[in-house]
Amino acid sequence: MAPAAAQLAEELGLPFRDLRLLSQALIHGSHIHERPAAGESNERLEFLGDAVVSLIVSEALWHHFPDEDEGSLTTRRAAIVSARGLARIAQRLNLDSYLVLGLGAALSGEGRRRSVLAAVFEAVTGAVYLELGLERTRAWLLDVAAPELSAGRPVATLKAAKSRLQELGYARHRRPPHYRVVEEEGPDHDRRYVVEVLVGGTVLGRGEGRNRRDAETEAAERALLKLEAGA
């Protein structure tokens, strides 16, 4: 594991002296379930990294958009720190190629899921913070998230997919979209949900995820694509 972590540290330009935390940040829970002796998964680092990312992104947006109110800044932050936003950064950093998955999860394509990619980015951020401190983590994160932080898109276009779909649902049918779980399978540590979303009684989107929230978000995004295409 250490050679992979060493290579990643070099690619990220981060001077890790102790690679144990970075190695842990790359271990998905499915790998530990199959090989309990392999150590600890990245979930605790993900928890810490989530808070670090939120703090640094909030501070950066506060400086970038001095004339915007709390609501607008919250919307911008949500767009960046969402599973979709962080997964995009993780893909730019090629983190998916370093992620250590269980065999079953690897075969099912779990490493391509947004929630998994976002989680490994948060875990890596947590490892960077513990190893190098807040200032070095801030400099690194501001660099890798520069495209998202500097984007000046109108706030209305950054709203979460479920919020936008709800607004459209009320506007067109005077009722909100309805989400329903059509599949739920897998053990507790590796659950898989499939959700459909109905707008005006018609199924417009279908999504998958490790929890209902992620599945509903994906379903909403696909429904929006149909509606924007004139469905």
Image (spheres, rainbow, N blue to C red):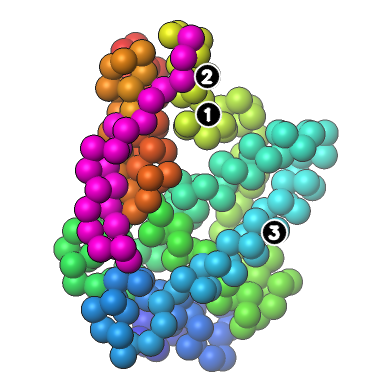
- Which residue is outermost to the right? 67
Is residue 222 visible from the viewing direction of this image? no
Could you tell me if the residues under marks 1 and 2 are in contact, i.e. CB atoms within 8 Å? yes
Quadrant including the C terminus: top left
| Quarter of image, res 195 | top left
Magenta residues? Answer: 174-196
Residue 172 included in the magenta stretch of the image: no
Q: What residue sits right under mark 2 in the picture?
A: 167
Q: What residue sits right under mark 3 in the picture?
A: 56
Query: What residue do we see at 45% from left, 8% from top?
Result: 172
Q: Rounded to the nearest whole Å, what is the CA distance between mark 1 and mark 2?
A: 6 Å
Q: Give the tally of numbered discs.
A: 3
Residue type at the position of mark 1 = Ser
Q: What residue sits right under mark 1 in the picture?
A: 163
Residue 105 on image: x %, y %: 23, 65
Residue type at the position of mark 3 = Ile
Q: Nearer the viewer, residue 189 or 227?
A: 189
Of the numbered discs 3 and 2, the one sitting upstream in the chain is 3
Residue type at the position of mark 2 = Glu
| Quarter of image, res 196 | top left
Query: What residue do we see at 17% from left, 63% from top?
Result: 107
Query: What residue do we see at 44% from left, 66% from top?
Result: 120
Of the numbered discs 3 and 1, the one sitting upstream in the chain is 3
| Quarter of image, res 47 | bottom right
Q: Secondary structure at mark 3?
A: helix
